[in-house]
Amino acid sequence: MSGYQGPMRVLSGIQTSGEMHLGNYIGAIRKFVALQHEYDCHYFLADLHAITVWQEPEQLRRQTRHIAASFLAAGIDPKIATIFPQSKVRAHAELAWIFNCVARLGWLDRMTQFKDKAGKNAERASVGLYTYPVLQAADILVYKATHVPVGEDQKQHLELSRDIAGKFNHDFKQPDFFPLPEPLIKGQFGDAGARIMSLKDGSKKMSKSDPSENACIFLRDDADTIARKIKKAKSDADVLPSEPAGLEGRAEAANLVGIYAALSGKTTADILSEYGGQGFGVFKPALADLVVEKIAPIGDELRRLEADPAHLDGLLTAGAEKAAVIADETVKEVKEIVGFLV
Ligand code: AMP
Ligand code: TRP
């Protein structure tokens, strides 16, 4: 056990590998927004992680700015939280190397995300994709972060971060040096809408890589596009049930009600007591109004911010300088502990 006594600190990152969508907003970004008022928060754009699979250089730069703009448009305040690109704070990569020498091959062999992403042809995957979770541990521990808001899918990586922190503390006889970071999976929004599914298939996660353009609502979508996608969303011919249990086996209906719950803050039971007995001809327009009300203003602000990349770059450089003060100090301490000349 770590007897870590340092401050509570929140850290999370999103890979700079695509367009932000409603699932990212509900599952991640709006949690980041809420947490900034309670904790010392660091949110970074994980570009070092993004290049573990091929990225077109110009597109990578655009996507990095896009995610930064999405954070700001959604309400993350750079005066309160620190926002920066991972590659601008070199301490991440430095600590990752040292952690490569702490983590054991057997630990990485168990990581399911690598197996999913590398697929059958694992021999052709980059070495970076394999050591991806080690870099993630460095991202977290270089700030001695205590709490990490992530989706369910990142739980295993968080456990690995704890294992690395624990082994480092043990091997170098510094029991209190690194905290053992805790995942923050549910947050104050509860379970509602934790996982947003495709609008075309209620069994698949909403994802930017869905081949159907109507399956995913992007933060960039304007009000008409949002309303059209909801109108075309897959549903079923039944009316809505008046109790949550009635949604069982109706994945698409459950997802639409889940989105409504997540964005309205109402419980599924409340929504169904209001809409139970009504068909999708009534529910979908109400849902479209709600999503437009919550998401379209973010899209407007996002486009405005993206139109001024120099302003975004300035904010990110300032964020990186602030982050580096903490991160460089940790690396300095680690180098001393490990036995490097300092
Ligand atoms: P990704 O775009 O998959 O790299 O995910 C970035 C963040 O958004 C992670 O914290 C995910 O857990 C979250 N996320 C991605 N897709 C969804 C979804 N469909 N529903 C809820 N959260 C999601
Ligand atoms: N692996 C995370 C994801 O795919 C992104 C990430 C990288 C991250 N480093 C992190 C999340 C550190 C939390 C903390 O969503």
Image: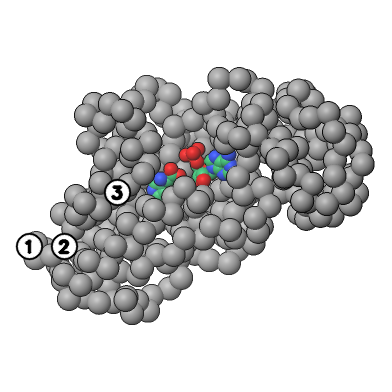
Whether residue 340 is visible:
yes
State the SS at label 1: loop
Amino acid on which disc 1 is placed:
Leu
* Circle 1 crowding by C-alpha within 10 Å: few under 14, some 14–19, many from 20: few
Mark 3 or 2, closer to the camera: 3
Residue labelled with disc 3: 110
| Among the 4 quarters of the image, the one containing residue 58 | top left
Give the class, few, some or many, for how many residues have Cα within 10 Å of label 2's Cα (few <14, many ≥20). some
- For this view, does 225 lie left or right of residue 176? right
Secondary element at image label 3: loop
Q: Nearer the viewer, mark 1 or mark 3?
A: 3
Identified at 85% across, 40% down, the residue is 240
Q: CA distance from mark 3 to mark 2?
A: 29 Å
Q: Which residue is mark 1?
A: 341
User: Based on the displayed image, in which of its 4 quarters is residue 86 positioned?
Assistant: top left
Q: Going by the image, does 154 lie left or right of 175?
A: right
Q: CA distance from mark 2 to mark 1?
A: 8 Å
Q: Are marks 2 and 1 in contact (CB under 8 Å)?
A: no
The amino acid sitting under disc 3 is Arg
State whether residue 45 appears in this view.
no
Residue flagged by tag 2: what amino acid is it?
A: Lys
Classify mark 3: residues with Cα within 10 Å, few (<14), some (14-19) or many (20+).
few
